[in-house]
Amino acid sequence: MPRKNKKSPKKASRPKKSAAKITQSPDFNDRTLRAHLAKNLDADTAHVNFDKTIIGWPEAARGVKPAGSPHSAWELLEHMRLGQWDILEFIVNPKHVSPPWPSGYWPATDAPPTKEAWEKSIENFRSDLQAMRDLISNPKTDLFAKIPHGTGQSILRQALLLADHNSHHLGQLVLLRRLLGAWPPQ
């Protein structure tokens, strides 16, 4: 039972809601949504993009795991490439079978087997990223329809998943590069 004459603690005050209505901008349309999605995949509005992060990575440091780091640059690059490839293939290929988790999404070695493997991984990552941009930019692509061979996923959901996954691992690559003393890129 509360005591009389005792003031109860004040609740934190919140700003009063504006009476303004939130409406859809007359400039917002399907093309705008697609442009925003494509820009989100570029990941250079709120943080650094893929090319700035990966280009010029010192060859000797591609397989190095600094103290406390669970992954090398090679592992992260390949994981990003494999994850992106899997998302894209899932969308466009009804017969696609995803690799086993987690082994199918990570390389077997800390370092790239060759300089060419590193370059090929970058090339494939860029190619699949462009394919995803092309897919979501195409006005014939229904971003909201469920993928027929999926379990309720839409292309919009997969595009957002891809942007989120890539940005997460790009952040890890930036941190890794800082720990290796190779940031900013020369």
Image: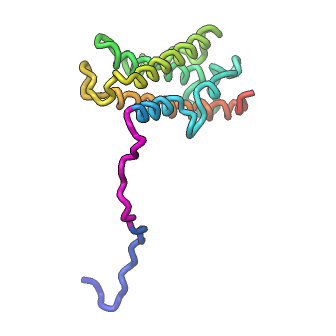
Magenta segment includes 159: no
Is 13 above or below relative to 129?
Answer: below
- Give the percent coordinates (x, y) of residue 85: 44, 17
Instruction: Tell me the quarter of the picture where residue 102 sits.
Output: top left
- Give the percent coordinates (x, y) of residue 74: 58, 19
Position of 12 with respect to 64 (left or right) is: left
Position of 134 with respect to 71 (left or right) is: left
Q: Residue furthest right?
A: 186
Task: Specify whether residue 54 is in view.
Answer: yes
- Give the percent coordinates (x, y) of residue 161: 40, 31
- Give the percent coordinates (x, y) of residue 167: 51, 33
Q: Residue at x 30, y 90 (%)?
A: 4
Report the span colored magenta. Answer: 17-30
* Closer to us: 168 or 138: 138
Q: Residue at x 40, y 19 (%)?
A: 88
* Closer to us: 68 or 24: 24
Instruction: Tell me the quarter of the picture where residue 62 sits.
Output: top right
Quarter of the image with the N terminus in it = bottom left
Magenta segment includes 27: yes
Instruction: Tell me the quarter of the picture where residue 103 sits.
Output: top left
Quarter of the image with the C terminus in it = top right
Q: Residue furthest bottom?
A: 5
